[in-house]
Image (cartoon, rainbow, N blue to C red):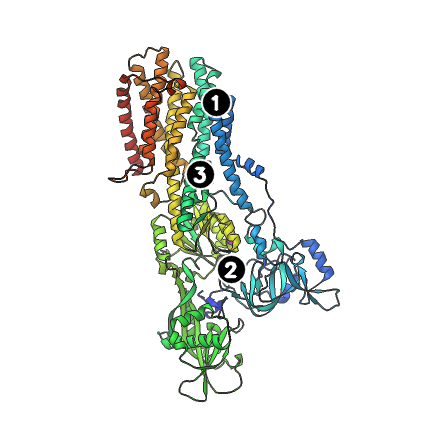
Amino acid sequence: MGDPAPQGRLSRAAGPHGEKTAAPGTTATARTDLGRGADGSRSGERPGRGVLEVLRALETGPRGLTEAEAGRRLARFGDNVLPARREVSWARLCVRSLRDPFTAVLACLGLVSAAVSAWGTASVILFLVAVSCVLRATGEHRADRSTARLRELVATTATVLRRPREDAEPVSREVPLDELVPGDVVRLGPGDLVPADVRLLRASGLTVHQSALTGESAAVAKDAGDLSDGTGNGVFGKPRYCFLGSSVATGSATAVVTATGARTRFAAAQGGPAGRREASAFDRSVHGISWILIRFMLLTPPLVLMANAALRGRGLETLPFAVAVAVGLTPEMLPVLVTVCLARGASLLARTRGVIVKRLPALHDIGAMDVLCLDKTGTLTRDRPVVDRSLGADGRDDPEVLRWAAANAWWTLQLADLPRPDALDEALLDADTDGATAYDAVAAVPFDPVRRLATAVLRTPGRLGTHTLVVKGDVHCVLERCALDEAERERCRALAARAADEGLRVLAVATAERPARARGYTAADEHGLVFRGLVTLRDALAPTAADALRDLMDGGVTVKVLTGDHPGTALRACRDLGVPVPADGVLTAGRVDALTDAELSGLVRRTTVFARCTPEHKARIIQALRAGGHTVGFLGDGVNDLPALRAADVGLAPRDAADVAREGADVVLAGKDLTAIAHAIAAGRHAGGNIATYLRVTLSSNLGNVVAMLFAGLLLPFLPMLPAQVLAQNLCFDAAQLAFAHDRPHPSVLRRPAVLRPRALLRFLTGFGLLNAVADLATFGVLALVPNGSGSGDDETLFHSGWFTENLLTQALVMFLLRGDRGGGRGRRPGPVSWAALALAVIGLAVPPSPLGPVLGLTALPPVYYLPLTAVLVPYAVGLAVLRRHRDT
């Protein structure tokens, strides 16, 4: 949109006037190998490469291929079909799910529990493993089907020029799409789907819908000329090329096929048959936490066995206890709690906001997201322009220039019998409705992509026998037809260039008076014009964008704009919306290409606007952000956005996006609206905060118990707790912690990304786990010093009962004091975690004297035990509160 070059040329051919001022887009390095396209990577071309060179590189001509040569090429290059992913069976997907380290460890512990006849524990663990595998297999099966809709976007037949033999005349005939080969000459007409990547040989009024590729709703004008500019939308913006997955809106063309099947840009954009997604933030966090637990669980049983064998002479009879200790360290309910937390958040979003979370872990990822990458058009701005200013030839405001431009737009639309105005004409008519109809017109010469002008012929007001030509269009083309000296022409170009550098689209307006005549007007009459001035237009801002961006930034999310447009255009949108852009916060695709991955990772952190980006640039920028430790989301809506959607931790697409982009996204929004993203982030942080709180509470408590059990095994002549007692208290604790799935986190949790950081979690576990171990050891001292501690069998039962009660009471305190909702204010009702903690404390006090107590080897505690237990619990609660306050500050 804005061209920094002095000529200020309009380079976007999407509308009848080119629509955008932009320098030619970045192109790939050219190669000439047959079947790879004429451009370099797939189907583009080196700047300046002409039609004859392309035909020569493809070893073909404008008369098409012979049938024999087409057959040879079909055998060489294969069918013109998109690559399909190999279907993976459900059984294989479930087995593949066991590669997750935490799932694998749980499965091993379940098998060991079964080997030592702990059938209850084994059943619970293996059931959770099965649920986890089924959920993961379901998600992968859905992802494997995401490319099925690709085939709905391509044609089934193509009109091809073929010759029966070398010296015969070409014959136009329909051939099946899959028989198309590089070098074939095809014909395109209105309504046709483009059957492959093609280079235009001839075109007449051709416009093409590329929304499935780029996400832009407007039809794009295409031109076979060698000097046409690009739109800045990467390879898809090249007007000389049409691509598989697009369709002809108007006009006709003859083109040569440059790439078919897997070699097309369409196939490249959707990642090919082997494209696999990298691990997301959720996957990385779970893997890191899993390996922490794995180290503890692998270390604990050998330590228990060796300590008991060396100091107490107990051998394999302590194996069930060792396994129970390892299981006690494991958060068995983690898969269930994660699923419930994420499913509740996803269900709420779907019901209230119309946001569909297709992959449950993506809800955590969007809550952990600290960088959001998005395009400008349709997100920060609406996909239509509005008039900014009308400037006279002297650079001052002149409303008369807008009136001439609006009259041109109105009468060109009426007399050229166009179906509807293009986006720029519509903006002009909205800005000056009265002026458009203030004149009477007699003729019009409509816009075409070669002239890049539109002319309306008006009856000159107050002067009979005179007609006024009003010419509007590309600045460079209008100035060439004006009667100006070179210095004046250069001054006008500089005026247009300054406006373009500010991110504005620019139209030039000129007039000329001619004697009235009966014969028609043509483009040859567009000469000797008087330059009237410029009309500048800017993108209309999305109505909710400014508020949504402010909310995102206040919530710790950095917004980065990845666009194919001119940097000035993106900068203007950011400035108008209040997005801060530092002086060195703009990076163009050319500079990105010159940087190594390490250099790019260091630079993307302080860059806000990335301009002139192709799909490959967007994916590489996102990978660089992730390499720098950021959790990255990307909002895209076209096939060209698929590489970036896959590269991001969480891919987002609006519901009206291209089918393949919508299928490849993790989260589907009701519309391309940042407000919906803010709601999804809040839901993700809610779920992520509850999951993080659950992990902190359960792991710190379990770690303290394990440390205490190790010391007790060395100090006591009997096992500190029977295996059944360990598993029973662990089951009670885990069941109570399911309340975290329904808890409401503290508001501070929603003000920053909810990230599960393994190292931070380890530090937390160390501090709170040691405090819990100290409380347990103090309980041992109390139990040893109170009366009836002579070491009899009754003493062993009393010890087990006392520690069982103390464990559940300390775990209840941990739940209450370390929960996500800390405080909540006066008069607030207790939440589900408070009630669950109270229930856990009641179980700890009630089970030993209940009929269930003897079944577990427990007995009622004498009243004398409760006073010293209280003396332990009160300092423990104070210590928890102090440590928590220290952690929060």
Q: As rendered, which of 808 and 28 lies closer to the eye?
A: 808
Between circles 3 and 2, the one closer to the viewer is 3
Q: Position of residue 830 (x, y in %)?
A: 29, 36
Magenta stretch encompasses residue 141? no
Q: In this picture, which residue range is highlighted in magenta? A: 612-616
Q: Residues within 10 Å of mark 3 (few under 14, many from 20)?
A: many
Among the two numbered marks 3 and 2 on one chain, the one whose residue lies closer to the N terminus: 2
Q: As rendered, which of 65 and 528 lies closer to the eye?
A: 65
Q: Position of residue 88 (x, y in %)?
A: 59, 41
**Residue flagged by tag 1: what amino acid is it?**
Ala
SS at badge 1: loop
**Residue flagged by tag 3: what amino acid is it?**
Thr
Mark linked to residue 118: 1
Magenta stretch encompasses residue 613? yes
Taking the spot 53% from the left edge, 80% from the top edge, the residue there is: 522
Mark linked to residue 211: 2
Among the two numbered marks 3 and 1 on one chain, the one whose residue lies closer to the N terminus: 1
Q: CA distance from mark 1 to mark 2?
A: 59 Å
Q: CA distance from mark 3 to mark 1?
A: 26 Å
Taking the spot 49% from the left edge, 75% from the top edge, the residue there is: 454
Q: Main secondary structure of the magenta part?
A: loop
Q: Residues within 10 Å of mark 1 (few under 14, many from 20)?
A: some
Asked whether the beta carbons under mark 1 and mark 2 sit within 8 Å of each other, the answer is no
The residue singled out by tag 3 in the image is 339
**The C terminus lies in which quarter of the figure?**
top left
Asked if residue 804 is positioned above or below residue 213 in the image, the reply reads: above
Q: Residues within 10 Å of mark 2 (few under 14, many from 20)?
A: many
SS at badge 3: helix
Q: Position of residue 664 (x, y in %)?
A: 51, 49
